[in-house]
Image (cartoon, rainbow, N blue to C red):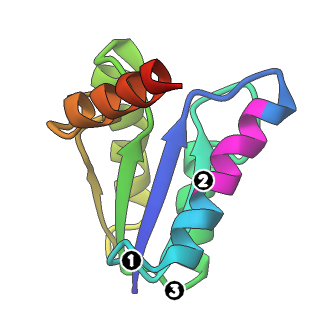
């Protein structure tokens, strides 16, 4: 089973965390990603933490987990913290293939998305 784990920073504001959890749920319901399970996890400040998110995916039967850093920039969290935590998890779940994707801000489609948002706003 393939799982997608969307990893955000985490916030003291629960509404912000709920938005990420809802994003994962919406992706799951849409069927638009080629994963059987879509979950959310957080780097810090709230739960589930990355290790807990990976554990949940494994307990649900995941044999492959794609970790998607839901971050705009390649700061320390994207470059060091997330890969470090995933590396620790791979030691615990040696029989599960866990890979980290490029962060959201690195996607080529960001230009088209941002332009579309700006143009739609300007047309209002």
Residue 68, placed above or below residue 114 = below
Which residue is depicted at the point 58% across and 59% down? 24
Answer with the quarter of the image where residue 62 lies. Answer: bottom left
Q: Position of residue 92 (x, y in %)?
A: 44, 60
* Residue holding disc 1: 35
Q: How far is mark 1 from mark 2, CA to CA?
A: 14 Å
How packed is label 3: few (under 14 Cα within 10 Å), some, or many (20 or more)?
some
Q: Secondary structure at mark 2?
A: helix
Seen from the viewer's position, the closer of residues 112 and 103 is 112
Q: Residue at x 60, y 47 (%)?
A: 41
- Whether residue 55 is visible: no
Which segment is the magenta one? 16-23
Location of the N terminus by quadrant is: bottom left
User: Does the magenta stretch mainly form a helix, a strand or a loop?
Assistant: helix
Q: Residue 74: x and y, percent? A: 28, 18
Residue 121 horizontal/vertical position (percent): 49, 23
Seen in the picture, residue 3 relative to 67 is either above or below; the reply is below
Q: Mark 1 or mark 3: name the one nearer the start of the chain.
A: 1
**Classed neighbour count for the residue bearing mark 2: other residues with Cα under 10 Å, few (<14), some (14–19), many (≥20):** some
């Amino acid at each position: 089973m393939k799982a997608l784990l969307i990893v955000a920073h985490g916030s003291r504001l629960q509404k912000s965390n709920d938005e990420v959890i809802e994003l994962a749920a919406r992706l799951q319901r849409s069927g638009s990603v080629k994963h059987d399970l879509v979950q959310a996890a957080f780097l810090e400040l709230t739960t589930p933490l990355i290790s807990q998110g990976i554990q949940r995916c494994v307990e649900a039967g995941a044999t492959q987990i794609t970790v998607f850093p839901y971050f705009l920039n390649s700061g320390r969290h994207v470059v060091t913290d997330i890969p470090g935590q995933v590396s620790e998890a791979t030691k615990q779940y040696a029989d599960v293939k866990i890979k980290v994707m490029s962060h959201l801000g690195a996607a080529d489609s960001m230009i088209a998305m941002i332009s579309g948002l700006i143009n739609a706003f300007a047309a209002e």
